[in-house]
Amino acid sequence: MLFAVVDIETTGGYASANCITEIAIVVHDGKEVVDYYETLINPHQPIPFFIQKLTGINDEMVATAPSFGDVAGKIYEMLEDKVFVAHNVNFDYSFVKHQLDLAGYELYARKLCTVRYARKVLPGMNGYSLGKLTAQLGINHGVAHRAGGDALATADLLKILVEKDTEGAMAQMLKLKNGEHYLPPNVKMEQVAALPETPGVYYFYNAAGKIIYVGKAVNIKQRVKSHFSNNKITRQKQDFLKDTRSISYKKCGTELMAHILESAEIRRIWPVHNRSQKGYLPQFGLVLYEDRQGFQRFAIEKLKATIKPVFKFNTLIEGQNLLKELIRDYELCNRLCNLSSGCACEQHVLVDEYNTRVGRALKKLQQMLPTFALIDEGREQEEMSCILVKEGIFVGMGYLPHSPVDVLTFDHLETVIEPLQDNDFIRNLVFRYAADNPDKCIELS
């Protein structure tokens, strides 16, 4: 078996918008170097100042260097039919494959990450960066952050790992169905293998133990693996792979509960790599008050802690449309509903008569705000799940032992569920599911 140990220097952190400035390839048989290639590459774009400081490669040095396309044939020849090896292999592979694709060469190679390999063969080391490993193992690193020095140091590291690999760790890692070569370098395969194949929510953590992504799944294991089953060249994907260090999960009884928990957790934690649902909370409310003449009046107000609305909306337009519907159906006054001025309805209608109309409109709103529980499958056979709604507001969800549904009460269910933040996104999910599954709904007083 031959290995192509690769290291590159680049103009940035992701392949879709950046280029290679230097590449070194060490062909190795696991015992010694068989071939070697190194060259600067003209990226045809400026090298950022901080990268010049890090690598020592500047625009003048690459000005007369070959373009990647000029050396693509040589690079492909050295990589073809070999195991692609690098320290954090997905980064180097994403750049090299992308540049080869642009030059008309299709590279499909097995990958081996020496970060992951070292963690298996040399557990308990004081850090697994290339610099820390070479210092601990007495490897001559040469010039750090240059392709040649890093590639040769990685090749020496590979030789040591092969010698100490007495339990076949490499053979297991190189199995095509293993999927380990897709994982971020610091995520343990054991964590992924231990994930359940059930509905639930999963969490990705960074090196500091902070949650950076929350996701939902019908099958947690399958969904987590899908995050790493490709090597996209975008900045978002590369940052995601770089930041992810560990994974945890929470099982849910149903897909709906996983959807709800994901939404609640995103708003609670605000993970950096989640894009959707942030800030999606009701902003306006319909309030009811009495004016000096005794008329009951509706008004739309921006939500505040001191306001107790009878209905909530995400947008002002949504609230105005509902209020216009109430005005039309119950013959309410535009001015007394604070939608326009110039109307003198209060001069032509008795207070009690008008307030009766408002009362009917309020009753209609209350009918739109039911109190009920959704009873469904639990996480285990001996339990059932409960999603609780009070007067149209999502209260929370939880699990309880199997019980006859006709003995369930709101007060009891409120003690067993986990309170969660209400929002329109969750409410719409629950109401839609309830409409499609009326047999799972229990109306509660």
Image (cartoon, rainbow, N blue to C red):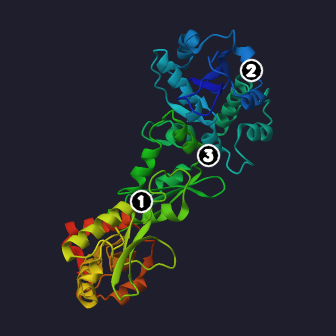
Q: Judging from the image, what secondary structure is the residue with disc 1 in?
A: loop
For the point 49% across and 30% down, the residue is 110
Percent of width and height locating residue 356: 24, 87
User: Is 412 or 353 nearer to us in this picture?
Assistant: 353
Disc 3 residue type (three-letter): Lys
Q: Judging from the image, what secondary structure is the residue with disc 3 in?
A: helix
Residue on which disc 2 sits: 58
Residue on which disc 1 sits: 196
Residue on which disc 3 sits: 120
Residue 141: image quadrant is: top right
Q: Nearer the viewer, mark 3 or mark 1?
A: 1
Between discs 3 and 2, the one toward the N terminus: 2
The CA span between labels 2 and 1 is: 49 Å
Image: 124 above or below 21: below
Disc 1 residue type (three-letter): Pro
Disc 2 residue type (three-letter): Asn
Q: Judging from the image, what secondary structure is the residue with disc 2 in?
A: loop
User: Is 382 or 174 nearer to us in this picture?
Assistant: 382
